[in-house]
């Protein structure tokens, strides 16, 4: 896709605006002439100008729309953004205290931990081996290969009894 530089964009925008408004005016004039011909003469001679004027109006509206699209979008954004911001702040206002309490409680909640059965050191909950003595925190079931706690007497998946 061809990238236009800023001067080309400005030129195209001005051309669309001027041409669009010109076609709008020509379309309106053609439609007025057709309507006058329709109502003032016994046999309309130039009523076809009504359809040509409609075509000019349509093309003029589209060109004008594209010529002013950026300005309209910027205006809409400047009108909508403060309203959206106020709405979001209003909706969040009632939840600030409860969310703050929730996160404070979450921060103060200690992580669940486990202790090594061999040396008694506290370990992180997801530790696979003790970082002090190297003892395994899980044992694998020989039948289904499921990981179980070291202290388990039976497999949590298949129920196989572990031999000690």
Image (cartoon, rainbow, N blue to C red):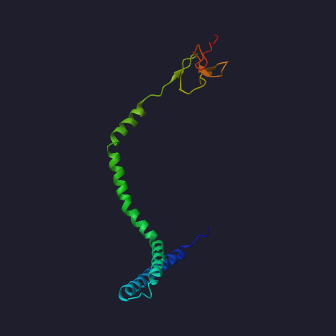
Residue 153 or residue 47, whichever sits in front = 47
- Residue 151 is situated, as x and y percent measured from the top left of the image, at 57, 15
- Which residue is most to the right? 142
Q: Quadrant of the N terminus?
A: bottom right
- Indicate the quadrant where residue 158 lies: top right
Q: Residue at x 39, y 87 (%)?
A: 37
Q: Nearer the viewer, residue 32 or 122?
A: 32
Give the image location of residue 150, x and y in percent. Answer: 59, 17
Judge by depth and name the residue closer to the eye, 59 or 133: 59
Name which quarter of the figure residue 80 lies in: bottom left
Quarter assignment of residue 53: bottom left
Above or below for 87 versus 70: above
Farthest-out residue, top: 164
* Residue in the image at 54% along x and 17% along y: 120
Q: With respect to residue 128, does 75 lie above or below?
A: below
**Of 25 and 1, which appears nearest the observer?**
25
Whether residue 32 is situated above or below residue 68 in the rendered picture: below
Farthest residue, direction front: 42
Tell me the quarter of the image containing the C terminus.
top right
Note whether 83 is above or below 59 in the view shown.
above
Count of numbered circles in the view? 0
Left or right of 41 in this view: 67: right
Name the spot of residue 141 as percent of width and height, x first.
Answer: 64, 19
Is 119 left, or right, of 59 in this rendering?
right
Percent of width and height locating residue 123 = 54, 24
């Amino acid at each position: 896709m061809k990238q236009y530089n800023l001067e080309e964009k400005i030129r195209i925008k001005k051309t669309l605006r001027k041409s669009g408004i010109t076609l709008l005016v020509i379309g309106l004039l053609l439609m007025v002439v057709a309507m006058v011909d329709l109502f003032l003469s016994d046999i309309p001679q130039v009523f076809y100008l009504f359809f040509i004027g409609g075509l000019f109006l349509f093309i003029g509206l589209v060109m004008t729309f594209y010529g002013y699209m950026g300005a309209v979008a910027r205006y809409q954004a400047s009108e909508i953004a403060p309203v959206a911001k106020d709405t979001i702040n209003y909706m969040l206002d009632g939840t600030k205290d409860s969310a703050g309490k929730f996160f404070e409680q979450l921060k103060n909640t200690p992580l669940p931990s486990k202790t090594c059965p061999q040396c008694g050191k506290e370990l992180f909950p997801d530790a696979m081996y003790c970082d002090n003595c190297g003892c395994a925190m899980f044992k694998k079931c020989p039948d289904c290969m499921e990981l179980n706690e070291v202290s388990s007497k039976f497999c949590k998946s298949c129920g196989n009894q572990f031999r000690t």
